[in-house]
Amino acid sequence: MRLVTVDDSAEGQRVDNFLLKHLKGAPRTLIYRLLRKGEVRVNKGRVKPTYKLNIGDQVRIPPVRLAEPGEPVIVSDNQQASILKTIIYEDDLMIIVNKPSGWAVHGGSGVSLGVIEALRAARPELTQLELAHRLDRDTSGCLMLAKRRSALKSLQELQRRGAIKKRYLALLAGRWRKGQATVDMPLRKNTLAGGERVVRIDPEGKPSRTFYKVMDRYNEATLTEVTLDTGRTHQIRVHSAYLGTPILGDPKYGDAEANRAFRELGLRRLFLHAHSLAFTWPDTGERFDISAPLPDELQAVLDKLGRN
């Protein structure tokens, strides 16, 4: 940890830009995550990215490991063992893991290590291993990787045709009276003035459709199974917020008051889990229906809730 005292050269500077200078090479996404989680403190308190520094402010900067360009990724034995334990299906063509929340699918978003790097280190014989799709870092659940180039092309073609049914479990703030809902609203990526990227509903955005089905009702929340007709960035998170029932634990699109209440119940992550994949392999006609159990920390939250 470093403690930096602000002098006249940085007076009036936004704290996010100050951090970019002191954490050279760090992407803005990492800077915002450090601020959001309170890992960066100014005068021992949390601040927003827009906070303007004053002379004498004490800025606590946490240690951040940034890989140099071209630097080989070092994966510890523990990290390799950890990622191998997440494999829930494997054959000659692909691997499906139950990705833990907090793991990036690949390095580059402020981290040097992701699922793909860890698996390549743990299984060096798989020289053609590639990600077949992606999940947000905070989302857990089914993640497909192809062992061969031919398998990668097949999986990508299935996704292009919408032939892979991806189902998620999402705990939404508030109560639903209806048993299901559909959101058909276009989404567009935006960059805010401070450099943070967000996704918003926009008539000029890409077509996006999400289907919701109620799985269980609680006094303060609704557990839904979510099926994607399209796969846009942050699609479920933005569409859930559009419905007025954002995903609990979502720091970007969620309800801050509801998130605080559920933190007291132990929810310290986004309650979004990719719980199943279903598709038919094009060459053989073999049917796959793979599911990933809900992580213990999410199940524990449900167990504490009173059903309605």
Image (tube, rainbow, N blue to C red):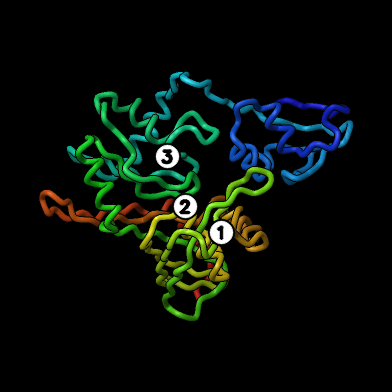
Residue 10 falls in which quadrant of the image? top right
Which disc number belongs to residue 233?
2
Between 166 and 193, the one lying in front of the other is: 193
Disc nearest the viewer among 3 and 2: 2
Between 208 and 135, the one lying in front of the other is: 208
Which disc number belongs to residue 105?
3
In the rendered structure, which amino acid carries the disc numbered 3?
Answer: Val
In percent of the image, x 64 and y 25: which residue is there? 24
Mark found first going from the N terminus, 1 or 3: 3
Label 1 crowd bin: few (<14), some (14–19), many (20+), radius 10 Å: some
The CA distance from mark 1 to mark 2 is 10 Å
Rendered view: 283 above or below 225 = above
The CA distance from mark 3 to mark 2 is 14 Å
In the rendered structure, which amino acid carries the disc numbered 2?
Answer: Thr
Q: Secondary structure at mark 3?
A: loop
> Disc count in the image?
3
Q: Report the residue that reaches farthest toward the front.
A: 204
Locate residue 273, reporting x and y percent.
43, 54
In the rendered structure, which amino acid carries the disc numbered 1?
Answer: Arg
Residue 122 falls in which quadrant of the image? top left
Disc nearest the viewer among 1 and 3: 1
